[in-house]
């Protein structure tokens, strides 16, 4: 399906009003481009490996929307948008107030990326296969023992397993899990690390994410992999900002440990240094004595920052594993 893209060159002050006015004429979604610096709240909600590079502040903004090619006359739509700009210019700065049009390629925007996500071996005991591919290539199943096949559809959540940060975590989980461990996955995204842990024979996994949609996607992936619902719990919440929530996560460990003591055998966090550093202060309270803390999502240039946080929080046996521009750090309490 081809789409016509309409881009309004405007001022940041006009963006909200334009959004409202476009909605009133039947535009169902818009795309906003500006150079307003991200707030701390924005950063906390970004589920990406590395934040965008900062750009020079500017008052300019672009508001774009898409219409199915042929569904409207481009000339008529430009006239309607221009009328809106003329009307609101009497009480708000509209900047340049110009409209540009272009035509997109014939692309399935939601599913086109799937073409590049192929089955692969993530570790000795785990192979990753997208849910839309029926058969794993035979060569990926070779080895001393056939790997467990983890099927994943990340949807809008982070975690296909193909990124270096996720591979590093899966490989460390493969190394550490021998059977019967309890795992806490902070910032679970698609749920891939918790699922991997359980396929590797962990006893129980608690997976958390501040994004409720990520938790929904993770639940679907647990079901796709036929994971027993009695062996895991998925919860939306913020362990850093909500101390009551963090306390409830600690409490859950006492319910799944045979001796009733608190603490998980492994805590894994594949997030960002800006989240890992404050999280690290809390992790000793989540772990059993001798428990392991696996962190990833760390650019090599920020390794020292995370190591400092680990040392200050009492972690020892701090080991770094690099892959490309990224590192994973595993430590013990």
Image (spheres, grey):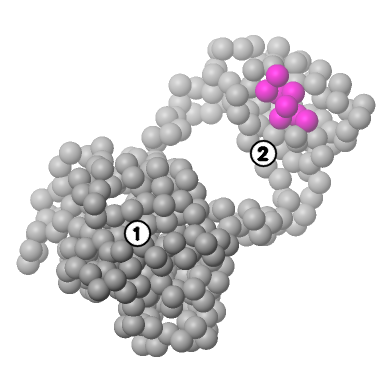
Q: Is residue 258 magenta?
A: no
Kindly give the residue lying farthest to the front in the view shown.
260
Quadrant position of residue 108: top left
* Numbered range of the magenta stretch: 17-24
Whole-percent x and y of residue 245? Answer: 49, 60
Q: Say if 114 sits above or below 262 in the image.
A: above
Task: Provide the secondary structure element on which disc 1 rests.
Answer: strand
* Viewer-closest of 294 and 7: 294
Picture residue at 7% right of the left edge, 67% below the top? 144
Marks counted in the figure total 2
The rendered magenta stretch, by its main secondary structure, is classed as helix
Tell me the CA gap for discs 2 and 1: 36 Å
Picture residue at 16% right of the left edge, 56% below the top? 148
Kindly give the residue lying farthest to the left in the view shown.
144
Task: Provide the secondary structure element on which disc 2 rests.
Answer: strand
Picture residue at 88% right of the left edge, 33% below the top? 92
Q: Say if 252 sits above or below 262 in the image.
A: above
**Left or right of residue 12: residue 175:** left
The residue that label 1 is drawn on is: 206
* Viewer-closest of 174 and 69: 174
The residue that label 2 is drawn on is: 32
Marks 2 and 1, the one that precedes in the sequence: 2
**Left or right of residue 248: residue 134:** left
Whole-percent x and y of residue 316? Answer: 39, 88
- Where does the C terminus fall, quadrant-wise? bottom left
Quadrant position of residue 283: bottom left
Quadrant position of residue 183: bottom left
Instruction: Answer few, some or many: residues within 10 Å of disc 1's Cα (few below 14, many 20 plus, some between 14 and 19).
Output: many
Instruction: Answer few, some or many: residues within 10 Å of disc 2's Cα (few below 14, many 20 plus, some between 14 and 19).
Output: some
Q: Is residue 20 magenta?
A: yes
Whole-percent x and y of residue 332? Answer: 36, 82
Whole-percent x and y of residue 69? Answer: 55, 17
């Amino acid at each position: 399906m081809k789409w016509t893209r309409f881009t309004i060159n405007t001022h940041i002050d006009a963006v909200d009003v334009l959004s409202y006015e476009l909605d009133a004429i039947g535009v169902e979604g818009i795309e906003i481009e500006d150079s307003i610096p991200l707030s701390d709240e924005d950063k906390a909600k970004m589920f990406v490996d590395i934040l965008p590079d900062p750009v020079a502040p500017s008052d300019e903004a672009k508001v774009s929307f898409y219409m199915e090619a042929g569904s409207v006359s481009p000339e008529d739509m430009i006239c309607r948008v221009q009328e809106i700009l003329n009307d609101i210019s009497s009480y708000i700065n509209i900047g340049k107030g110009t409209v540009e049009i272009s035509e997109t390629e014939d692309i399935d925007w939601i599913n086109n990326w799937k073409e590049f996500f192929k089955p692969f071996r993530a570790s000795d005991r785990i192979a990753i296969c997208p849910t839309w591919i029926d058969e794993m290539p035979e060569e990926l199943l070779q080895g001393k023992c056939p790997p467990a096949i983890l099927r994943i559809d990340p949807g809008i959540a982070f975690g296909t397993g193909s990124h270096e940060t996720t591979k590093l975590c899966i490989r460390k989980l493969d190394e550490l899990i021998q059977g019967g461990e309890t795992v806490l996955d902070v910032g679970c995204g698609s749920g891939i690390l918790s699922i991997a842990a359980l396929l590797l024979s962990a006893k129980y996994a608690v997976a958390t994410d501040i994004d409720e949609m990520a938790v929904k996607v993770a639940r679907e992936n647990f079901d796709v992999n036929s994971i027993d619902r009695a062996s895991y719990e998925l919860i939306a919440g913020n362990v850093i900002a909500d101390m009551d929530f963090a306390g409830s996560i600690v409490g859950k460990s006492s319910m799944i440990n045979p001796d009733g003591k608190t603490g998980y055998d492994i805590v894994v966090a594949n997030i960002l240094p800006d989240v890992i550093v404050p999280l690290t202060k809390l992790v000793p309270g989540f772990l059993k004595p001798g428990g392991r803390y696996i962190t990833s999502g760390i650019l090599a240039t920020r390794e020292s920052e995370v190591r400092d946080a680990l040392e200050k929080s009492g972690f020892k046996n701090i080991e770094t594993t690099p892959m490309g521009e990224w590192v994973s750090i595993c430590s013990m309490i």
